[in-house]
Amino acid sequence: MSDIKMDEAHLPTDLLELAHRLLIAAQAAPASEVQKLVEAGAPTWYQDDSLGWSALHYAAERKEPQILEILLKGGAIWNSVDKWGRTAGEVCISLGDEEGWEIIRNEGIRSEMLHHALAGPSSPQSDSSTNMKLKAEDKTSAGDNLTFLKSKLTWDVGKDGKERVLDADGNGVMMGWEEPLMVEHVKLMTHDHPNAQPGAEGMTIMNVGFGLGIVDRLFQSTQSPSHPKPLNHTIIEAHPQVLQYIKDKGVDKLPGVRILEGRWQDFLLDPERLGEVLQGTPGGMGYDAIFVDTFAEGYEDLKAFFEVLPDILEPENGIFSFWNGLGATNATIYAVSSSLAELHLEDVGLDTTWHDVLIPESLREEVWKGVRRRYWELPGYKLPIAKMKLM
């Protein structure tokens, strides 16, 4: 058993005693004893000082699904992390316990859906209780979009030899290692679309968030001269330095390209400006392909974007995708976040297909040299492709 150190400043003496007993019981006692302690009011969320482990972590180490379920029903926090940032789900993964991991993952999905149901309609000014971010998770310019838009950006070449953009705090806004993922996004969004076939008029495309311009360059590229370039390519970007970068690169002068300067919320959440966004799409019916890769926005912002998709996505063949960096420093949170996004897309009438892409490049140490903190820790990427449901 671990050395459990209790902080007496946080709980009354009687609850401290119950918390201590529950942590011990989760390590070795039968399920019936754990159940009794939970029913007696033992705080299932409590974590020890030595490892930062909760009773859920210890139950995961035992590979005891019944105890996991008792603790979760008793209020254990599915995504509480230890001193190394690991949830109980990661303990299950490390031990090859798929059953235990699925119990924790399913509880995560249930609790997050309940949270959003109780919160009501999403607001881009609010945030999830789990503080799930598209890329980063802090209070600097990487954690607040309005702060980010006022921050100074730096373009340089990392130790891996690839271009990257860093914010004023040294956080990665976009990095060159992401390009293979963008290639897959663009390929899956365009290769079967009728307007991208030889002889067609070309697709109408919206990209929210320019970054290094990787995805926009790929959308502009064609596999052969017989494949049409985009008929209309709208880019929504708000950061003044990125807008200048776009002009310096001449992207705004490319045929069919239109730059809307501002946050996507300024355009898509304003009924009077929505018509401006849809200009250039046949009959104003929506875009053939929409991609979102913003920075310093929370999950609530992404959910709010989902909710306007029926108004801006072409209903018959339209394809939506987004940079899926939700909780990408933790495998369990990443799985729950992806499932949550799928369910919320389903709520607005879209079916999602996931494509697994290996990205070992993202784990190389030289990729992250000079970056304040990693926003990616996983060897695989879950790439979403969503389409309107067939009636």
Image (cartoon, rainbow, N blue to C red):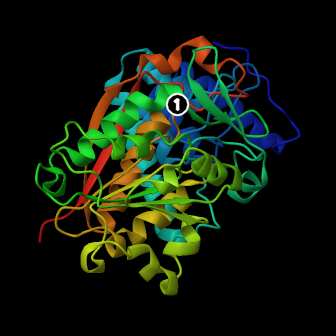
321 vs 281: above or below: above
The residue lying furthest to the bottom in this view is 272
- The quadrant holding residue 24 is top right
Q: Is residue 65 visible?
A: no
Q: Position of residue 77 (x, y in %)?
A: 57, 43
Give the residue at mark 1: 330
258 vs 11: above or below: below
375 vs 352: above or below: above
Foreground pick, 5 / 127: 127
Residue shown at 48% from the left, 85% from the top? 271
**SS state under label 1:** loop
Number of callouts in the render? 1
- The quadrant holding residue 194 is bottom left
Foreground pick, 99 / 320: 320
Q: Position of residue 300 (x, y in %)?
A: 54, 61
Split into 4 quadrants, where in the image is the C terminus? Answer: bottom left
Looking at the image, residue 230 sits to the left or right of residue 341; the answer is left
Residue shown at 79% from the left, 23% from the top? 5
Foreground pick, 343 / 125: 125
Residue shown at 26% from the left, 41% from the top? 222
Looking at the image, residue 177 sits to the left or right of residue 344; the answer is right
- Could you tell me the amino acid type at mark 1? Asn
Q: Position of residue 217 (x, y in %)?
A: 41, 42
Looking at the image, residue 104 sits to the left or right of residue 319; the answer is right
142 vs 179: above or below: below
Split into 4 quadrants, where in the image is the N terminus? Answer: top right
Foreground pick, 35 / 55: 55
Residue shown at 45% from the left, 16% from the top? 94
